[in-house]
Amino acid sequence: MNELNTNMVSNSGYVSSVADGVCTIKLLPDLRIGELVSFNSLTGLVVSIEGSDNVKALILGDETLVHEGDSVVGTSEFLNVNTNLDILGSVVDPLGNHLIDKSKGVYDDFLIDENLELLNQTKK
C-alpha cells in the first residue's frame, strides 16, 4: 500500500479501547465510513460511526501496536488498492503487499487505480 498522504487533517483524536483488531476512537467527529485513519505507525479503516463521538475502526496491521490513549489522525483518504497485471498469480496480503518476493514483471507501468467505496458512506 502506498504511503499515506501528508495532507492529514489538523484535528486528532485518541484510542479509547482496542479489542479483536477493532479500536474505538474518541474526539474525532469528522470521520466518514471508509476513511483511513493513521495511528503511530499503522493505518486503520473506519467501519462504524455511533453517535457524534464514538467511531470504530479496523486496525490494518498488528493490533498489539495500538494502545489506549494513542493519538489518531483522520487522513481524508479512502481505501484504494493499486493493482497491475503483475499482481496476477502473486501471493499478497489484504493490503496488496507481496508475501512472496517476485521479480518485476513487464507490466509495471500499467497501473489500475480502483477506489473501493462503501455504500452510504456519507452521514446525513
Image: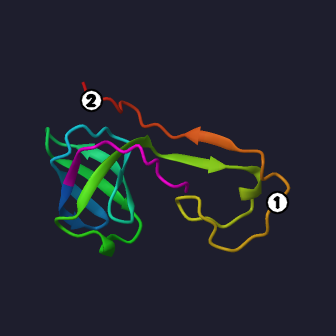
User: Residue 62, position in %: x, y?
Assistant: 38, 72
Quadrant the N terminus occupies: bottom right
Specify start and end residues of the magenta stretch as a single range. 1-13
Quadrant the C terminus occupies: top left
Q: 43 or 45, which is in the foreground?
A: 43
Q: Which residue is mark 1?
A: 105
Residue type for callout 1: Gly
Give the class, few, some or many, for how many residues have Cα within 10 Å of label 2's Cα (few <14, many ≥20): few
The overriding secondary structure of the stretch rendered in magenta is loop
Residue 47 magenta-drawn? no
Q: 74 or 51, which is in the foreground?
A: 74
User: Residue 86, position in %: x, y?
Assistant: 76, 56
Image vertical order of residue 99 relative to residue 51, above or below: below
Q: Quadrant of residue 68?
A: bottom left
Residue type for callout 2: Lys
* SS for dot 2: loop
For this orientation, the residue located farthest to the top is 124
Which residue does the image show at 42% across and 37% down from the upper left? 118
Q: Which residue is mark 2?
A: 123
First-in-chain label (1 vs 2): 1
